[in-house]
Amino acid sequence: MPISWTHRYAQRTQRMTSSAIRELLKVTEQPDMISFAGGLPAPEIFPVEEMAVAADRVLRDFGPQALQYSTTEGYRPLREWVAQHTAPSLTISPDNILITSGSQQALDLLGKIFINPGDRLVVEAPTYMGALQAFNPYEAEYVAVPSDEQGMITAALEPALQASPKLIYTMPTFQNPTGVTLTLERRQQLVELAQRYGVPIIEDDAYGELRFEGEPIPKILEIGGSGSSGGDYDGSVIYLSTFSKTLAPGLRLAWIVAPLEVIRKLVQAKQGADLHSATFNQMIAYEAVRDGFLQQHLPVIRRVYRERREVMLAALAEHFPPETHWTRPDGGLFLWVTLPPGISGVALLPAALAANVAFVPGASMFPNGGGENTLRLNFSNATPAQIREGIARLGRVLAEQLGR
Ligand SMILES: Cc1ncc(COP(=O)(O)O)c(C=O)c1O
């Protein structure tokens, strides 16, 4: 008898949808396509040589250990490195760190341990689509707080907190998708309100190291995370970061900083998911960063991304209609375009793809609808020449849509 799969799928799969970005990336592999769609780093500056040296050293010095199963919490020296480098003003012990298989897994594990069906999460609108994909199967509901050029509009946060959310999920620095950064004043307001309402904050900091302009602003972790007991971090902010944008996304290595009891629960959840993150990759990453390699490498990444952002901003000014607006990020990988009202990013996409240029329509990043006239552009992956050409193509497609 033929099996009917559909009616066997669990209830939670009804909230699982394919990422529009991943679907798009399939098309963007065609030759001559210029893609501003993915969130891919610039491959030209991946530290291939350094990784080869590190991999060689790991195999030579620790061969069997590197190829063996290891602890769920992660490779201890790497956790010590993370504990030392995350927030010098706080007491963070290696036991406060869980190494994860990308921060995408961190989001899934947080969903797994915290979200019951119907639980509310406060998120920015727009927010990271991958976070919605991670939280949706746990049947989260979203209370969306709008954002502007200064990040989440904290004046709109209090009504959201009155809806008794379980958590606040935020990307305060070079946010995905908008590229904007929450100001210090709003960070303080966010922390103050979250503490007043007793709601923990998840700070997703995938891009904080990629600042190429302006002065660094303290992490939410640093502002709101004070709290330690016996040398361990015990605050109400859970912090995520990743090696994906500083070393290489193919390593699939990231980390969570959280109070010990949360780490213990996450460890149980991770055991059910993948036992532990790849031992070999963790040891390679540690070998690569232990002697300060990132301090040499980050300036290279920042220089390249700054140039690409400059090129994209100049091309937008030259080729986009005057009624369009865009953000001017001080770091990260993305900028955000607002089209004239009535012009839909989703409707624009087929014409753009036909002209061999790709972007992600912004609407899918609004958990409760809206943002039809927005789009996200990635400026890290295409070369400056491709950026100039791709934005010119997009400008022509837009002009056609506007009937010019
Ligand atoms: C805000 C944010 N969080 C998490 C991730 C997942 O990153 P990874 O799993 O590569 O660490 C991304 C990837 O683009 C992101 O933009």
Image (cartoon, helix red, strand yellow):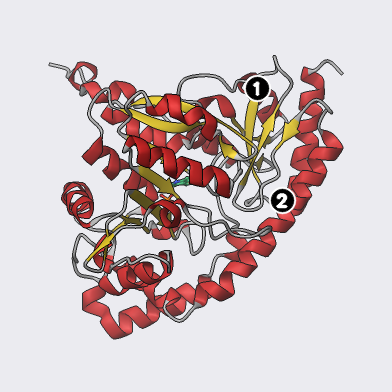
Splitting the image into 4 quarters, where does residue 354 fall? top right
Residue in the picture at 77% in, 28% down: 324
Task: Residue at the far left: name it.
Answer: 1
Quadrant including the N terminus: top left
Q: Is residue 383 visible?
A: yes
- Nearest the viewer among 298 and 236 is 236
Whether 255 is drawn above or below 107: the answer is: below
Amino acid residing under circle 2? Arg
Q: Earlier in the sequence, mark 2 or mark 1?
A: 2
Residue annotated with mark 1: 373
Residue projecting furthest to the bottom = 61
Q: Nearer the viewer, residue 157 or 260?
A: 157
Residue 18 position by quadrant: top left
156 to the left or right of 238 = right
- Percent position of residue 373, x then y: 65, 22
The disc placed on residue 309 is 2
Crowd tier of the residue under label 2, counting other residues whose Cα lies within 10 Å: few below 14, some 14–19, many 20 or above: many
Q: State the residue at coordinates (58%, 75%).
A: 296
Task: Give the secondary structure at mark 2.
Answer: helix
Residue displayed at 79% across by 31% down: 395
Point 33% across, 38% down: residue:
199
